Image (cartoon, rainbow, N blue to C red):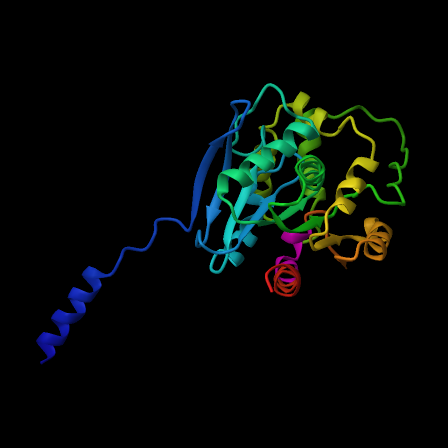
């Protein structure tokens, strides 16, 4: 009997489907202007889809903790905008019209079901550019993380300090990456992130910081949608969040008072809980 049981166990182990080599798959699609763009995909394709859009020069994998957290129950996409991450470094298109179209074409490529767009930093502006031009028919909701949405009050200019030599682009990016976090991140991880950011050429990076539209452009997009909107911010944008919630019937906000700009990295458990709660109550009830 023991021999029979042992044989049954061996057969069961041999017949069991092999575990996937990776829970996250690397994918590409080609835009209407011929640029090959990259995204990460995880989770069951038939489940509700979340599309994560990163910030200025950042790679899709900065959302790695959210990919891990949500892939068991959601179809998770993390996007590399043009010139970022593993996407093609295109010669043109580093302006809101093309960047918004790239998001529209990614969503179209993913299939007919509405998606929840979760956008951070410059990704907020790129996603609002998408809404401004293409509307919200393909959106189940919007999560906008730690950037201005064109509401009042406008952001204050940075304080002027003593004149200093301008750092090289590489030195600037090293400093920028490290200032995004309040929690400890390993030097190896920060170096990896810096290298990824430096893949965006300096002229393209500069163009991304000088979008040629008035700030009202973003505000118009926010108020043009009747989809649920979650605005997750630090105190810098708290007054804009208050105005949004007062004026937009479907909007709510959450304040992170003790986190850096990449607050979903600094406080991933809290961010994930906030996102889950919003989806449960407002997006996919």
Q: Main secondary structure of the magenta part?
A: helix
> x, y (%) of residue 116?
60, 51
Q: Residue at x 61, y 33 (%)?
A: 197
Query: What's the magenta region?
Result: 263-272
The N terminus lies in quadrant: bottom left
Nearest the eye: 269 or 76: 76
Q: Residue at x 67, y 54 (%)?
A: 183
**Does 225 sit above or below residue 1?**
above
Quarter-wise, where is residue 151 in the image? top right
- 254 magenta-colored: no
Rendered-image quadrant of the C terminus? bottom right
Residue 203, horizontal then vertical, whole percent: 68, 21
Residue 66 position (above or below residue 214):
below
Please indicate whether residue 63 sits to the left or right of residue 22 in the image: right
Q: Position of residue 217 (x, y in %)?
A: 79, 35
Residue lying furthest top in this view?
91
Hey, which quadrant is residue 214 in on the image? Answer: top right
Task: Give how far across and how far down residue 263 sits, in percent.
Answer: 69, 52
Left or right of residue 244: residue 37:
left
């Amino acid at each position: 009997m023991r021999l029979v049981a042992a044989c049954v166990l061996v057969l069961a182990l041999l017949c069991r489907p092999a575990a996937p080599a990776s829970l996250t798959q690397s994918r590409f699609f080609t835009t209407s202007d011929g640029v090959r763009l990259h995204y990460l995909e995880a989770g069951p394709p038939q489940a509700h889809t979340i599309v994560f859009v990163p910030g200025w020069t950042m790679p899709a994998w900065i959302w790695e903790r959210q990919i891990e957290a949500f892939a068991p129950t959601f179809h998770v996409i993390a996007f590399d905008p043009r010139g970022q991450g593993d996407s093609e470094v295109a010669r043109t298109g580093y302006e809101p019209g093309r960047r918004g179209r790239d998001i529209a074409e990614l969503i179209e490529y993913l299939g007919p079901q509405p998606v929840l767009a979760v956008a951070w930093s410059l990704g907020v502006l790129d996603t609002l550019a998408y809404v401004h031009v293409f509307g919200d028919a393909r959106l189940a909701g919007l999560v906008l993380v730690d950037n201005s949405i064109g509401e009042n009050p406008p952001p204050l200019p940075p304080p002027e300090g003593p004149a200093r030599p301008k750092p090289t682009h590489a030195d600037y990016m090293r400093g920028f990456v490290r200032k995004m976090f309040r929690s400890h991140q390993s030097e190896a991880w920060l170096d990896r992130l810096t290298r990824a950011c430096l893949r965006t050429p300096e002229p393209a990076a500069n163009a991304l910081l000088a979008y040629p539209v008035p700030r009202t452009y973003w505000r118009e997009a926010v108020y043009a949608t009747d989809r649920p909107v979650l605005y997750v911010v630090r105190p810098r944008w708290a007054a804009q969040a208050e105005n949004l919630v007062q004026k937009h019937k479907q909007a709510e906000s959450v304040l992170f008072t003790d986190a850096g700009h990449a607050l979903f990295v600094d406080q991933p458990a809290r961010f994930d809980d906030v996102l889950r709660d919003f989806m449960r109550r407002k997006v996919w009830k």
